[in-house]
Image: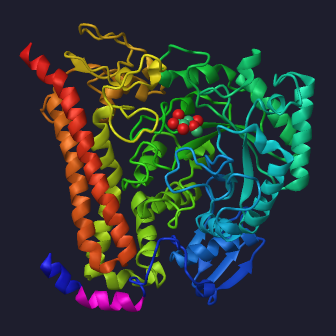
Amino acid sequence: MKRFLLSALPLVISLLSFSALRAEDGSRLWLPSDTSVFKSLTLRLDNSMPADDGYRINGNVVTARTQQGLLYGRYAWLRGEQGESHPYFSLRILNHWDNLDGSIERGYAGPSIFWAEGVEGFPGGTSTITRYAEACASIGINGSVLNNVNASPKMLTRAYLLKVKTIADLLRPWGIKVYLSVNFGSPKALGATKTADPLDRNVQRWWQRKAQEIYKLIPDFGGFLVKANSEGQPGPFDYGRSHADGANMLADALKPFGGIVMWRSFVYGAKHKGEDRVMQAVSEFAGLDGQFRDNVILQSKNGPLDFQPREPYAPIFDQMKKTTQMAELQITQEYLGQGEHLAYLAPMWKEFFSFVAPSKLKGIAGVANVGLDRNWCGHHFAQANWYAFGRLAWNPALSSEEIAKEWLKQTFFYGEKSSEKTAAEANSSLFTLHSSLLSMMLRSREACVDYMMPLGLHHIFKFDHHMGPEPDGFKADYPIEWCPVYYHKADKWGIGFNRSTHNTEMPGAENGTGATQQYREPYCKLYDSPSTCPEQYLLWFHHLPWTYRMLSGRTLWEELQFRYNRGVGEVEDFVRIWQEARPYIDAQRWQEVDAKLQTHLRDAREWRDVCLKYFGSFAEDSKSK
Ligand code: GCV
C-alpha cells in the first residue's frame, strides 16, 4: 500500500492540476461543469445519413442528419468516441415512480424533481428539470414517464396536465418526450362516467377527448403507460374484459395523434390466483398474442418475478410472437441494497440480453433512481446505473466494462476527453486505481447475489420495504406470494422451489409447477433437470436435499455457506479498494461513499448471518437425521 501511494504521488499532483480533486458534491453527475468544452467542435447536418438520430464523429467534426443527432454527438465526442453510431432501440425511456405528493415509490434519493404537494412549481426549480434533461440526453434517453404506474386519476385533470405541458416544454429541447402513467379507472374515479368498462361508448369518448386535450397542450406527447389489474389497480377484468380490450381502447384514443400505449405484463394474483406467481404473466397474456393494436407495446420486467438480484429471464419474451414488446429494467435498487449498497447493474442487464435478443424488443424502459438529493441518486455510484441504462438503450452491445470505464472517467477523473488520457494512464498508478474501481463495480452485482440470495434463492426480503433479510417471513393475512417462506420452502429435508415438471421424492415436498415449460428450447429442457440447470438458478427451479452434491464437490448446504461468505468477502474488498482510492478522490464524495460502504458491509454481514442461521437450523437438523 505504501509503495502504491509513493509511486502515485506525481500523479496526485497532476490530478490536482486537471481538477480531479476539485470540490465535488456529485450534483455534476458525469456532465461537464462548463459547456465551453464544446467550443472547439464543428457541427454539420447531413441529409444523406440514415434517418435516425445517430451521428458520425471525425476528429472534432460531428455530423448528423438531425439536430438531435448533433446533440447526442457532442456528448459522445466528450466521451472520446470516434466514428459512426446509431440508436439501437427507438424507445429509450425512464419510468419515474413519482407520486403527485412528491414521494417516490421505491425512491432512495429524496423526493420527486417533478411533483410536490400542490400542483404549482417544481421542488428543485426548473433548472433541476433542465439539468435532468441534459443528463438524459447526454446518454441518449428520449422519453420520460413522469408519474408512478400506481397512478392517481388526478394526473389527468386540467391543472396537472398544464404542469405536464410545462415539463414537456422543458424537456423538448433535449429530445425527450413526455409520457404519463394512467389509472385505468380514471373516467369513473373523476366522476365523468359511471363505469370504466373499455367497451362502454361513454368511456371510450372520455379517453378520446382526454387524448385530444393532451395533444392540444403537448403536440409531441408520447403516450400512456398502464398497470392494470395488478396489485389492486383497476383494469379491464373489473368489467369482464381482457387486457387486449383495455389496451386497444386506449390505443385507439391515442392513434390519431401518433401516441403509444405501454401495457405492463406485471400481473399476479388476479385471474390466476394460486398459480405459481412466476407463471401468471404468460398465463394471462399468451392467449392474447396477436390481438393488440399496432400502437400497443407489452412492457415486461426482465425477470418473471420482480427485479430480484438474479432471476432467469421472463419467458413472456419467448411466448409473445406477434406482439410488440419492450423490457422494463429497474435502475432504482429496490432489491439490491436501495440507496446504501454499491451495486453496478449493467452486468445484470447484459445477462438479460444474453437470453432475450435486443432485436426482439422495440424499446427499453428503466425505473428511474432520480430524486432531489444533491447527488441525484442517493449513492454516488448509483449514478452509474442511470448512465449504464442510457448507454445500453443506445447500444446494447456495449460491454459492462466499457460503460463503467466511461462513467468513471467522466465522473471521477474528468478534465480531459477520455481517449486522450489512455496512453498516459497505461503506465501509471492512476491506471491501477481505475482498474480497482472498475473491478469493484464489475464484481458488485454478483457480490450482492452472493450475500443476499445465492444459487437461485429469491424474495427472502423483509416485508414491504425490501431492504434486509427475513427468510422466516410469513404473515397469515398477506397473500402467500409476498411471504419469503413460499419462495425458499426450506425444511429439514431440503430447500428450493420446484418449478420443474418432475415431482420431488422428498417428504412433504410440493409437486413441480412446470414453469420450466414456459421457456423456449434449449432452456425449457436445461432448466427442468437439476443436473443441467445452471447452478445460479438451481433453487429457483428445484427443491433439493441439503446433501445434494454441487459441481464444486461441496454439499448444497456447504455451497450456500461458501457463497454467503464469498459475498461478504467481496464487500470487505470494496471497502479496502475505496480506502486506497482516498488520495485520488475529492473529499466529500470520498467520505460519502465511504460511509455508504460501511453500511453496505454491515448489511452484507447481516444478510449472511441471518440467512445462514435460519437455513442452518434446518440443514444441521438434517445431518442429525
Ligand atoms: C410500482 C413491486 C414493487 C412495487 C411496484 C410494483 C410494480 O411490487 O414492490 O413498489 O409498484 O412492483 O412494478 O408495479
* Residue toward you, 443 or 521: 443
Image point 88% across, 28% down: which residue?
203
Can you give x and y, in whole percent of width and height, for residue 9 in the image? 23, 88
Q: Which colour scheme is used?
A: rainbow
Quarter location, residue 522: top left
Name the quarter where the N terminus is drawn: bottom left
Hey, which quadrant is residue 43 in on the image? bottom right
Residue at x 64% of width, y 83% of height: 61
Please tell me how many numbered marks the rendered image carries: 0
Q: Nearer the viewer, residue 625 or 292?
A: 625
* Residue 553 or residue 376, whichever sits in front: 376
Q: Position of residue 365 (x, y in %)?
A: 60, 47
- Asked if residue 13 is among those painted magenta in the image, a careful observer would answer yes
Q: Can residue 312 be seen in this view?
A: yes
Secondary structure mostly seen in magenta is helix
Taking the spot 25% from the left edge, 43% from the top edge, the residue there is 606
Q: At which x and y percent is residue 102?
A: 64, 51
306 within the magenta span: no
Q: Quadrant of the C terminus?
A: top left
Which residue is most to the front?
A: 117
Position of residue 574 relative to residue 488, above or below, is below
Task: Answer left or right for 500 relative to 230.
Answer: left
Relative height, residue 549 to residue 462 (above, below) = above
Q: What stretch is highlighted in magenta?
A: 9-18
Could you say where residue 406 lies in the image, as x and y percent from the top left? Answer: 45, 70
Residue 548 in view in this figure: no
- Which residue occupies 85% across, 35% down? 252
